């Protein structure tokens, strides 16, 4: 038997509760002041070498004063955020967050709810939020869903259920029990998380057919139908079509109703990756275009992107609640539900996804939706779309700028083009232009390649953006572009800044 220690017992709560209160007030003051003045600051500041060194020191063994820990955060971590809380941030597809959302995370942290099991308020909030998500999408009330960390996991969760629905004994026999080689279909513009999902669910990336797109970057449905026929003729088993509600490159929306019809005719699963674009369903102008969401077998979308909520929170909804549960439910003694007591709560959420322990991410969704109401979000999303069309117009108006894809939702792809350079030179020029715009903290769009051309890409899922911010980005682009062109030596086909 162990000897019983005579040392005084310890814990991790503060020695002085007044200290933690003082620090807490200081943190709230600092953070709220910072957010209030965010627009006056550069959109992004590169992480300095000294800070990188600070952030690679070894494991601390001795305690540090909490005020010092916070000072370290304020000095070395906070100023070098990714920029997405700033009104001129348009990179990738990232949400802004809100002050109330940050408080919700703080409150969830205090409760420290493990939103998996038990008769606790968090599970009822989680359930209510899933119902609200269904209502946002006008999805059948009989459907089910789960909150996850984001679009990637939401999409994988959707494909796991699709796979298990086609293979009767998938849970025990795996993909080996499939009566043929499983094949899924999506467009070549589909997000790479669908490829990862194909790998994870065991069908492999090769069995994910990437169908060509038209000039508007939407899936070519004739090519899709031909490929399905070819695969069936070869004895393979098509089981799922993945449609895009907003591609990451250009915001293109696949012809979802047509994809739905094809899936119904082929009797296969129809999943929609609507990571950001599904939320455009709240905008009256997009309701019809995105109507097929209401009938999809599953739809994945993020609340941390175009619902402007704090990272991380995404959602996946399923039309067939039984199929959803069948893919994940297991019976184990330690999770048995009781009639009374702590284990009397709703069914464990682990019956609907991979995770058992999970945070109380539903709280920020619940608080944010109550704070603003769904109508405000609809207006906010419509405003972002209007801003994208405004930006597209401004690009078209300037002779030095070229619109590189038609604007269909909230993504604008453009480049600086003075008119006397070939595509290769324009690629070099625009890459340098973008780096300078970001490093100077003027605005933060990102980039992509469209048909081999390097383009500056602005995705607007930002509630702090106003049109004037887009004007600043346009003016910045032209100013930097003009400067770069002056350093361009047409004889050498080189730029001074590259040979320096
Ligand atoms: C962002 C995105 C994803 C991935 O979502 P995460 O929340 O980053 O995991 C998937 N598909 C599309 C179209 C996206 O824009």
Image (cartoon, rainbow, N blue to C red):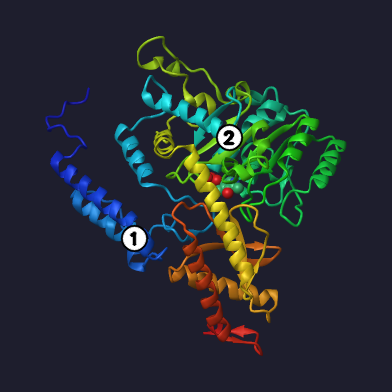
* Residue 249 rendering spot, x and y as whole percentages: 63, 56
- Decide: is 499 above or below 269: below
Instruction: Mark 2 or mark 1: name the one nearer the start of the chain.
Output: 1
Q: Residues at badges 2 and 1 in contact (C-beta under 8 Å)?
A: no
Structural distance between the alpha carbons of marks 2 and 1: 37 Å
Q: Which residue is more in the foreground, 311 or 354?
A: 311
Please identify the residue farthest to the bottom as the structure is shown: 491
Please give the label number shown on residue 137: 2
Name the mark nearer the viewer: 2 or 1: 2
Q: Which residue is mark 1?
A: 79
- For the image, the number of numbered tags is 2
Residue drawn at point x = 17 percent, y = 34 percent = 10
Please identify the residue farthest to the top as the structure is shown: 339
Q: How dense is the environment of label 2, judged by Cα within 10 Å: few (below 14), some, or many (20 and up)?
A: many
Q: Is residue 378 visible?
A: yes
* Residue 365 rendering spot, x and y as whole percentages: 44, 37
> Where's the N terminus, which quadrant?
top left
Residue drawn at point x = 64 percent, y = 42 percent = 199
């Amino acid at each position: 038997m162990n000897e019983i220690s005579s040392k005084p017992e310890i814990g991790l709560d503060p020695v002085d509760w007044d200290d933690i209160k003082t620090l807490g007030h200081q943190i709230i003051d600092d953070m709220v002041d910072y957010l209030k003045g965010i627009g006056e600051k550069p959109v992004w500041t590169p992480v300095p070498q000294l800070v990188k060194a600070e952030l690679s020191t070894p494991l601390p063994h001795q305690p540090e004063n909490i005020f010092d820990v916070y000072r370290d955060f304020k000095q070395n971590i906070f100023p070098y955020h990714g920029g997405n809380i700033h009104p001129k941030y348009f990179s990738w597809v990232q949400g802004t967050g809100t002050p109330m959302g940050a408080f919700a995370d703080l409150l969830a942290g205090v409760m420290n709810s493990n939103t998996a099991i038990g008769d606790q308020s968090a599970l009822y909030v989680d359930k209510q939020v899933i119902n609200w998500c269904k209502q946002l999408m006008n999805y059948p009330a009989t459907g089910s869903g789960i909150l996850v960390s984001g679009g990637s996991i939401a999409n994988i969760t959707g494909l796991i259920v699709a796979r298990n629905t086609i293979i009767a004994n998938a849970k025990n026999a795996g993909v080996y029990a499939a009566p043929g080689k499983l094949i899924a279909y999506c467009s070549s513009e589909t997000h790479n998380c669908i490829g990862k999902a194909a790998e994870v669910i065991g069908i492999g990336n090769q069995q994910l057919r990437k169908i060509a797109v038209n000039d508007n970057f939407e899936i070519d449905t004739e090519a899709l139908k031909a490929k399905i026929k070819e695969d069936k003729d070869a004895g393979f088993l098509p089981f799922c079509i993945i449609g895009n509600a907003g591609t990451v490159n250009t915001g293109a929306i696949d012809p979802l109703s047509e994809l739905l019809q094809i899936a119904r005719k082929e009797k296969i699963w129809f999943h929609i990756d609507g990571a950001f674009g599904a939320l455009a369903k709240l905008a009256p102008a997009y309701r019809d275009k995105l109507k097929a969401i209401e009938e999809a077998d599953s739809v994945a979308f993020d609340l941390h992107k175009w619902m402007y909520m704090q990272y991380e929170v995404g959602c996946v909804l399923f039309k067939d609640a039984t199929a959803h549960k069948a893919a994940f439910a297991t019976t184990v003694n330690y999770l048995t539900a009781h009639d009374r007591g702590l284990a009397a709560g709703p069914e464990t959420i682990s019956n609907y996804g991979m995770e058992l322990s999970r945070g109380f991410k539903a709280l920020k969704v619940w608080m944010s939706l109550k704070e603003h109401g769904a109508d405000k979000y609809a207006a906010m999303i419509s405003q972002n779309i209007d801003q994208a069309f405004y930006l597209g117009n401004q690009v078209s108006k300037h002779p030095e700028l070229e619109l590189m894809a038609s604007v269909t939702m909230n993504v604008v792809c453009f480049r600086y083009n003075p008119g006397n350079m070939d595509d290769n030179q324009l690629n070099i020029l625009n890459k340098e232009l973008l780096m300078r715009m970001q490093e100077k903290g003027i605005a933060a769009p990102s980039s992509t390649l469209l048909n081999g051309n390097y383009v500056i890409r602005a995705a607007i899922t930002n509630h702090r953006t106003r049109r004037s911010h887009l004007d600043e980005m346009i003016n910045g682009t032209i100013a930097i572009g003009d400067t770069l062109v002056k350093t361009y030596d047409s004889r050498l086909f080189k730029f001074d800044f590259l040979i320096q």
